[in-house]
Amino acid sequence: MSKQVTKKKEVLSAAEKYKRASDKRRANNRIIKTKTKTAIKKVLSAITDKVTPAEVVELFRLAQSRIDRTLTKGVYKKNKVARMKSSLSAKAKDYCLSVKA
């Protein structure tokens, strides 16, 4: 009896191209997500550090811009973006009103 040697199928060039493109998109999306999360954390840390409301509003504007960019780039879907913005704006608003009062 002879042993049959099974050949491994070579990965097709289309599959290799798809994998390269997928890896590139994943890397870009990861960068965008990281920058967005960092912007959100800056707002939240400013709130916990009790900085001036003007600074919180400025950080919130930058974070909101970054969050909107994730939607236009297709990283997050619109409902997730809406939730993120709503949650962050509620926290920033509560802080600003509590400091002024």
Image (cartoon, grey):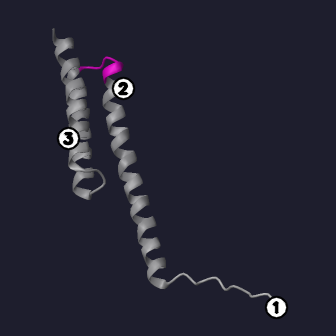
Left/right placement of residue 9 relative to residue 97 reads right
Disc 1 residue type (three-letter): Ser
In the image as oriented, which residue stretches furthest toward the top? 101
Q: Nearer the viewer, mark 1 or mark 3?
A: 1
Which image quadrant for residue 52?
top left
Circle 2 is placed at which residue position?
45
The magenta stretch is: 47-52
Near-viewer residue (68 or 62): 68
Separation (CA) of disc 2 from disc 3: 21 Å
Expressed as whole percent of the image width and height from the top left, the position of residue 28 reads: 39, 59
- The numbered disc on residue 51 is none
Nearer to us: label 2 or label 3: 3
66 lies above or below 85: below
As helix, strand or loop, the secondary structure at mark 2 comes to: helix
Mark 1: few/some/many CA within 10 Å (<14, 14-19, 20+)? few
Q: Would you identify the image quadrant in which residue 94 lies?
A: top left
Question: Residue placed farthest to the front in the image?
Answer: 1
Of residue 10 and residue 70, the one placed in the foreground of this image is: 10
Q: Residue 63: x and y, percent? A: 26, 39
Q: Residue at x 20, y 12 (%)?
A: 98
- Residue drawn at the location 82% of the way across and 91% of the way down: 2
Q: Main secondary structure of the magenta part?
A: loop
What residue does disc 3 label?
A: 82
Q: Is residue 26 left or right of residue 52?
A: right
- Closest to the camera, between mark 2 and mark 1, is 1
Q: Earlier in the sequence, mark 1 or mark 3?
A: 1
Would you say residue 51 sits in the magenta stretch? Answer: yes
Q: Is residue 45 magenta?
A: no
For disc 1, the marked residue is 2
User: From mark 1 to mark 3, how far is it between C-alphas?
Assistant: 64 Å
Q: What is the x, y in percent for residue 81? A: 24, 44
